[in-house]
Image (cartoon, rainbow, N blue to C red):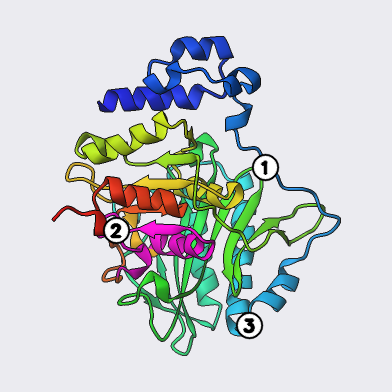
Amino acid sequence: FLTNVVEGLALHAAHAVQPLHYRAIQRSHSAYMQQTTQDQAYGASHTSFYTDAVAKDSYDTLDDVLAEKMADKELLQVIKTMFDACGTITEALRVELVTVAEKQESVFGDVQLGVDVLADNLMWDVCKTTPLIQNGASEEEPEVREMHEDGKFCICWDPLDGSSIVDNNWAVGTIIGIWGSRTGIIGATGRDQVTSMVALYGPRTTVFVVLDDGVYEFTYKANGIDGWICSRERIQISPDSKIFAPANLRAAQDLDTYAALVEYWMNNRYTLRYSGGLVPDVCQQFTKRMGVFANPTSPKAPAKIRLAFEAAPFGLLVEKAGGKTSDGISGGSVLDVPITGIDQRTALCIGSSNEVERFNEMLGLGLHKEH
């Protein structure tokens, strides 16, 4: 069955770029055998989900928005420092070739690229020179380091998520979770974060951040502004979605329930939007205002997503934007899973609430688990 699923996904991904008559011939999956009137009239355009953003006469700057939407002025300073770091990483990515780093220092065994090391070193430098930061932890290393004894915040980051696709010049990103020094990172949960933010490095650099009244998007050096402008405010993710991003498809070989879920999405003509990069695959939920990213695990396809570095920061962003998360085991929010180790891994489903609920139901998690 997995072969049929993969073939179906391949046809689905090609759907938007092939001529209509060629696509019709290629559709071997039963869902694609029914040509609708809408397909005939509009081709692939109605499944492309183009932006509906309308240009404004002026845009607020990062400083303006933070001054109004972030009451904790010490946290405001740390957020601005993180934005500065993301801007610097942006500039570096524009000029650095993607090559294997001379020294391989990842204790997790991951292959490090030169751009990985550059981004990680920059984040450490920021932590060392910012007195408000008490502790720091990088996805590249398995420990929480003390930076400043009297600091107020603990920073956890993935310096450049998407290393395996950055050589393709695909979008990658930086993921940052910020906890207060009272809870720290180890022993806390994702819900204890005081904020989180994710930078997406693509044709443009955008950062999504949790502020006091919701999730905001800022864009770097746009509209002739030498800095950050607010390009989306108080983002909301719809409960329903027609976009899906199915990660870890190998697990469908072991989990008939996951294979059935992927088949459901295809049979119901959802649009496939999956790059293999966690940052672009989840961030599309903020711009399209819908989506679901699923990454279940199985004995032969274990969890890879790190709770502290990836799942918790994204979980806070998505839930603050009205979405939902599942830990893939109990069916509960990934934000409620205690962080017992800095390299702790987790399954994950995240996005539009009804789709996450469907994931829980079809995989038999939580209240849907058979007794």
Residue 277 location (% of width, % of height): 45, 44
- Residue depicted at 43% across the width and 16% down the height: 33
- 23, above or below 90, in the image: above
Residue 265 location (% of width, % of height): 40, 35
**Amino acid type assigned to the residue bearing label 1 in the image:** Thr
Tell us which disc is closer to us: 3 or 2: 2
The segment highlighted magenta reads 309-337
- Residue depicted at 77% across the width and 48% down the height: 54
- Judged left or right of residue 29, residue 44 is right
Does the CB distance between marks 1 and 3 fall below 8 Å?
no
What's the CA distance linking mark 3 and mark 2? 33 Å
The answer to whether one can see residue 102 in this image is: no
The answer to whether one can see residue 352 in this image is: yes
Q: Quadrant of residue 313?
A: bottom left
Tell me the residue that label 1 is attached to: 51
Of the pair 217 and 185, the residue shown nearer to us = 217
Which mark is on residue 331?
Answer: 2
- Residue depicted at 21% across the width and 40% down the height: 255
What's the CA distance linking mark 1 and mark 3? 32 Å
**Amino acid type assigned to the residue bearing label 2 in the image:** Gly
Tell me the residue that label 3 is attached to: 71
